[in-house]
Amino acid sequence: MSWTDMAVGGRILVVDDAMENIQILHAALQDEHEVLFAMDGPRALEIARKQRPDLILLDAVMPGMDGYAVCRELFASPETADIPVIFVTALKSPEDETRALGAGAADFISKPVNAAVVRARVRTQLTVKRQRDALRALILLDPLTGVANRRAFDERVEMEWRRCGRAQLAVSLLMVDIDHFKLYNDHYGHPAGDATLVQVARAMRNAAGRSQDLVARYGGEEFAILLPQLEEQGATGVARRLMHELEMLDIPHAASPTNQRLTVSIGIAAMVPGEHSQPGDLVQVADALLYQAKADGRNRYRTSTG
Ligand SMILES: Nc1nc2c(ncn2[C@@H]2O[C@H](COP(=O)(O)OP(=O)(O)OP(=O)(O)O)[C@@H](O)[C@H]2O)c(=O)[nH]1
């Protein structure tokens, strides 16, 4: 696909408190796009989080939560921060336009809308978003497994640490390391090792399925699973699910001195971010517990409570 082919068909969320306006935009966009709609701010945020639209057309003036407040919430959350927003509003002054762009909007369309203009502006924003997503994938994803890379993990752990700190909620982290992977490579060959890393990464994604969870390749055969807003007990559940997934995969590891199939060891740390702690502390604790799990015989998890 070339850069210019990237605009075709997207999922667009239209937010307006008047059904009539939603119908006009729906009619303008439905031939090319999937159109979702919401009639107030809280519902718009819920749909944005659950259905991940490619673009949001947002009315600035709505009763209760207005468009600017919706925009702030969208940009504050890692799950929705990347969704571009076009303000669609009857407000026309340069101040209104500047305020919308200042709130992070990608563009601004005045009511009454012209269908051809809406289609053209939507196409432009979708192209820009897809180009940006492609670049972000190059920068932030591990090319072998498709999960986040170390750089993405470092960015995200800082963000979640601040977010959970404000809300005084726990952040959990699993550090996961494949057992005797050097022997696996030596026995089955490096390409088989690569294929196994892909399978293990997929098992981790299955085990940590909430939209805010992040699976990252931390180093060669070491992975990190970041679990915001989850206490140790929930994190332990994720570790168990991962071990179960691997059991189901049943990948032979004939060279392993500890088990005949591929296993992992896991260190689990859970903390409520405080004034005197940093994300590095979370990584350090999880790493130490991973080391403990290895020392205790592998194929197990360790938490600070046992
Ligand atoms: N196939 C493959 N192997 C990798 C990749 N990245 C790292 N490795 C291998 O992972 C192995 C890690 O080995 P070690 O750190 O000695 O640990 P281990 O053999 O897993 O032993 P324990 O962790 O103590 O259970 C090395 O042999 C690396 O070559 C990769 O991208 N592909």
Image: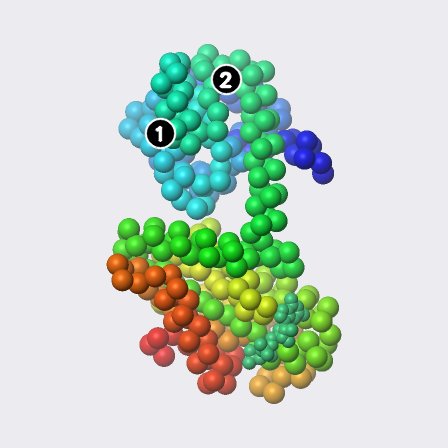
Q: Nearer the viewer, residue 228 or 104?
A: 104
Side of 17 where 152 appears, left or right = right
Residue occupying image coordinates x 58% and y 70%: 221
Residue occupying image coordinates x 56% and y 22%: 121
Sooner in the amino-acid sequence: mark 1 or mark 2: 2
- Expressed as whole percent of the image width and height from the top left, the position of residue 208 reads 48, 60
Q: Nearer the viewer, residue 247 or 231?
A: 231
- Expressed as whole percent of the image width and height from the top left, the position of residue 54 reads 54, 36
Label 2 belongs to which residue?
A: 24
Of the residues tagged 1 and 2, which is closer to the observer?
1
Q: Secondary structure at mark 2?
A: helix
Extreme-bottom residue of the structure: 257
Q: Quadrant of the C terminus?
A: bottom left
Residue 68: give its label.
1
- For residue 31, above or below residue 195: above
Image quarter of residue 158: bottom left
| Mark 1, other Cα within 10 Å: few <14 / some 14–19 / many ≥20 | many
- Expressed as whole percent of the image width and height from the top left, the position of residue 108 reads 46, 22
